[in-house]
Amino acid sequence: MEDVRFPVILWLVPLVPIAAIAVLLRDTRASATPAAPATPTVRRASAFSPDGDRAAMTSAAIRVLRERAASPRSSAHELEQLACLHAHLRPVVAANPATPANVLSWLSTLGDVQIDAAIASRRSVASVATPVSGVRRVEADRVATAVTVPSLLG
């Protein structure tokens, strides 16, 4: 008989599937247990947090939101977000002259007495202001006509 010698590496080949099975078992055990978060989650109150988190909001945040809701320089989008997210600010948003008509119509459908009163006060202020602005417009037309007529004649 002839003596056959195999390289040492061939003797290790049957061990490869055993090592692969060991790795798979280790991974399945690791995924079965939930991993603890590395760092604790810290949640801060946002200026635009919904009414459910109103207790978590500071008085300074509430004051800032009220100022934004009352400011005529607030954007239409910001007023819409304040009206949707903060029920306690809806009367203030309804009284704001910069509030768009679509937000006012939505607010009027809610049936809140304070909101309806704020919208009614806007209408009364607008009806009083309209004749004054109309008079100013007529006076501006007279001044423009007075300026342009002599320049055409002379």
Image (cartoon, helix red, strand yellow):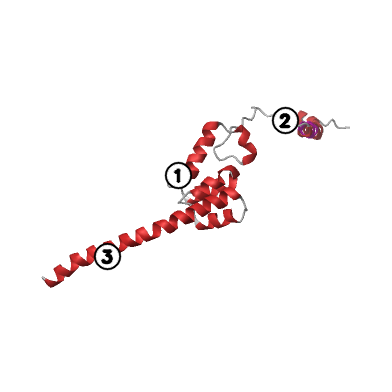
- Give the number of the mark in front: 1 or 2: 1
- Please tell me which residue lies in front, 109 or 13: 109
Do the CB atoms of the residues marked 1 and 3 lie less than 8 Å apart?
Answer: no
Earlier residue among tags 1 and 3: 1
Chief secondary structure of the magenta span? helix
Give yes or no for residue 27 being in the magenta stretch: yes
Q: Secondary structure at mark 1?
A: loop
Q: Earlier in the sequence, mark 2 or mark 3?
A: 2
Residue numbers of the magenta segment:
24-30
143 in relation to 44, above or below: below
Going from N to C along the chain, the mark reached first, 1 or 2, is: 2
Q: Pointer 1: residues within 10 angstroms few (<14), some, or many (20+)?
A: some
Query: Residue at 53% across / 57% down in the picture?
Result: 102
Give the image location of residue 98, x and y in percent: 45, 51
Residue where numbered disc 3 is placed:
141
Question: Where, by quadrant of the figure, is residue 20 drawn?
Answer: top right
Residue count near mark 2 (Cα–Cα under 10 Å), binned few <14, some 14–19, many ≥20: few
* Residue 31 circle label: none
State the quadrant of the C terminus.
bottom left
Instruction: Return the residue nearer the eye: 77 or 1.
Output: 77
Residue at the left extreme of this rendering: 154
Of tags 1 and 3, the one toward the viewer is: 3
- Kindly indicate whether the residue at mark 3 contacts the one at mark 2 (C-beta within 8 angstroms): no
Of marks 2 and 3, the one in the foreground:
3
| Residue at mark 2 | 35
- Percent position (x, y) of residue 124? 47, 55
Amino acid type at mark 2: Ala
Helix, strand or loop status at disc 2: loop
The residue positioned farthest toward the right in the image shown: 1
Disc 1 versus disc 3: distance between alpha carbons?
32 Å
Q: Give the label on residue 71, or none.
A: 1
